[in-house]
Amino acid sequence: MMVPAVLLLIGALFAVAAPRLLARADWPDREPVVALWAWQCVVAAVLLCCALSMTLSAAAAWQQVRGHVFATAPSAVVEAYALGAAGAWAPTTAVALACGGVWSAAMLVREIVRARTRRRHRRAELLVRAPLLPGEQSGTGRLVVLEGERPEAWWLPGASPRLVVTTAALRRLKGRQLDAVLAHEQGHARARHDWLLHCSAALADGFPQVPVFAAFRDEMHRLVELAADDMASRRFGRLTTALALVELNEDRGVFGPCPAPRGQVPQRVHRLLTPPDRLTAAHRLRLTAVAALVPVVPVLVTLVPGLRALS
């Protein structure tokens, strides 16, 4: 039985080769939205390879599963997969991959629960620092202004999303710079970047020994910021957005010789100040189409024996 093994080999190939190819390319920094799609397609292909390999391994190991998977398939298709010739590896592979799937789901649920807990605590803090006015109902206002000595702005997603900005940011940012910062945070909200961060964190925490998932998490954190920067710069200009980033972060040590944890801020500012060398629309469309076709590969590999049997 070769198809499950081939699928696992393809998944390992995607997991090893794709991050290296994306790391060497220079277009992800120019087109972060396309890069986000490419990374999602790579991870989807890896997970799909594992899911299909698990399904075929289980079908090879147990007659009951085989009857459900190939219930409507002609007998020639079942014979083409040679499911009856599977060795002792089939149930082991199926159980191991099923455990991996359950573990992934558990990690995602844990990440969502943690995110909701953090969000609930931050909302409680907001309510303490910015209490409701008489007659005001919770969740009716999208903008919250907090007293604070540090210039900050962030988006708090949820059922009643809030855009939070401190008084220090209002004093420091002038005119269009403040508008650019708010547009940046609104860009995160419109694209639902929080879900990308949750999914990538769940995979990276659940499988810390798998490099592709750690790289997926790190790149999601970086690319969503670049994508939000582009959304703001399209409305208010690249220079204005860069100056707003500098004003928000210059007191945090991110521009010194030993940058603080937000060390990507200087790179983001440099990227905004560098004349854009964007891909053409046709090139961007081709890259997106290729990325979208990546998960189709394991499906085609799975269907090859059945298609041969029907031809």
Image (cartoon, rainbow, N blue to C red):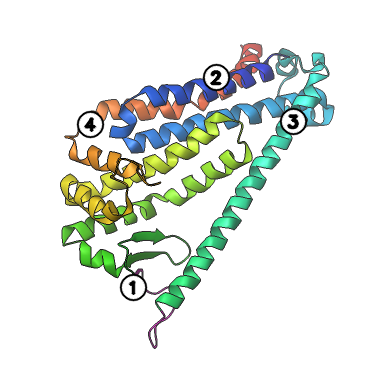
Three-letter residue code for mark 3: Ala
- Which range is magenta? 131-146
Q: Quadrant of the N terminus?
A: top right
User: Mark 3 falls on what kind of element?
Assistant: helix
Give whichever of 162, 118 is nearer the camera.
118
Please tell me how crowded label 1 is: few (under 14), some (14-19), or many (20+) other residues with Cα within 10 Å.
few
- Vertical relation: 219 (above or below) 157: above
Q: Which residue is mark 2?
A: 13
Question: How far apart are the alpha carbons under marks 4 and 2?
Answer: 29 Å
Residue 297: image location, x then y, percent: 53, 22
Three-letter residue code for mark 2: Leu
User: Mark 4 falls on what kind of element?
Assistant: loop
Please tell me how crowded label 4 is: few (under 14), some (14-19), or many (20+) other residues with Cα within 10 Å.
few
Q: Earlier in the sequence, mark 4 or mark 1?
A: 1
- The answer to which image quadrant residue 177 occupies is bottom left
- Vertical relation: 228 (above or below) 293: below
Q: Earlier in the sequence, mark 3 or mark 2?
A: 2
Of the numbered discs in the image, which one, if any, rests on residue 96?
3
238 inside magenta stretch: no
Query: Disc 3, disc 2: CB below 8 Å?
Result: no
Residue at the (29%, 39%) spot, across then down: 267
Question: How far apart are the alpha carbons under marks 3 and 2?
Answer: 19 Å
Query: Disc 4, disc 1: CB below 8 Å?
Result: no
Of the numbered discs in the image, which one, if any, rests on residue 147?
1
Q: Earlier in the sequence, mark 3 or mark 4?
A: 3
Residue at the (28%, 59%) spot, across then down: 182
Residue at the (67%, 37%) spot, across then down: 101
Indicate which label's residue lies in the foreground, 2 or 1: 1
